[in-house]
Amino acid sequence: MLNIKFPTPRSPRTYVAIGLIFLALVAAMAISGEAQKTSLVWAASRDLSPGHLIIAGDLMTKQVLLPDNARGYFLHSVAVTGYSVTRAISTSELIPTSSISKSQSISIMRSLPIRVSRNDMPINLRAGQEVDIYSIPLPNNPNPFDPLLVARHLNVESIDQKTIDLGGEIGVVLSVSDTLVLPIINNIENSRVLVVRHAL
C-alpha cells in the first residue's frame, strides 16, 4: 500500500508572516526608488543680498528630493557664478531660479548706515531680513508732517551688536539701490526712523 503524505495546511500566522515580508520588500523598493530621485542642487553658503554678484564662495551643494519642483532650482550642473541676486537668499537656502538673474542691468546696490532708536525696531531683528522704513516727525520739528513710508523691501545687511548692548541708538546697515540713497537720507533727516520688519 502506497504511503502518500499530503502537505500540512499552513496556519494563518504563516500567511500573515509571508504577507508582511512581501510588504516590507515592496516598501524597500519604493524607498530605494524615491532615493534615486534626489538631485544635487545649488544652495547659498552665506546670506546673499539683492544686487550681489554670485561668486564660487557663495555656493554650496545639497542633495535633496525634488520630485515635482526640480525646475524651480538650479542643478549643480548649471553654472550660476556671475548671476545677480534679485531677492534676499538666506544661508543654506536652495537657490530658486526666480531669485537670481543673468542680467547685469539691475540697480547697483549700496550699503546705507542709519541709526535707529532701540524702541523703534524689532529687538530681535537680524541680518538677511526684509524691512520697511518710515519717517516720523520729531516732537520739536518746526515743520510737522504725517508719518511717511520712505522705502519698502529693504534687506538688512548688518546690525551693530555693540550698540544694542549699550542701549540708545542702534546702528543698522541696509542694502539699497543707488537710486534710493539720497531720497532715503533726505526723508529721514531730522526725523524719527521706524523700522518695520516683514512677517516671518
Image (tube, rainbow, N blue to C red):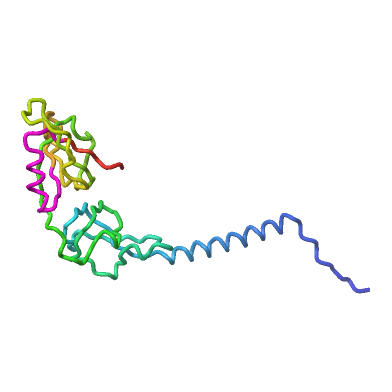
Q: Position of residue 192 (x, y in %)?
A: 12, 33
Question: For this rendering, which residue is in front, 37 or 126?
Answer: 126
Query: Which residues fall within the magenta stretch?
Result: 173-193
Q: Position of residue 134 (x, y in %)?
A: 17, 38
Question: For this rendering, which residue is in front, 162 or 175?
Answer: 175
Question: For this rendering, which residue is in front, 3 or 66?
Answer: 66
Compared to residue 132, the image places residue 20 above or below, namely: below
Residue at the image position 20 percent from the left and 46 percent from the top: 152
Image quadrant where residue 97 sits: bottom left
| Residue 192 magenta | yes
Question: For this rendering, which residue is in front, 104 or 124?
Answer: 104
> Residue reaching furthest bottom?
2
Image quadrant where residue 145 sits: top left
Residue at the image position 17 percent from the left and 38 percent from the top: 148
Residue at the image position 36 percent from the left and 66 percent from the top: 71
Compared to residue 22, the image places residue 110 above or below, namely: above
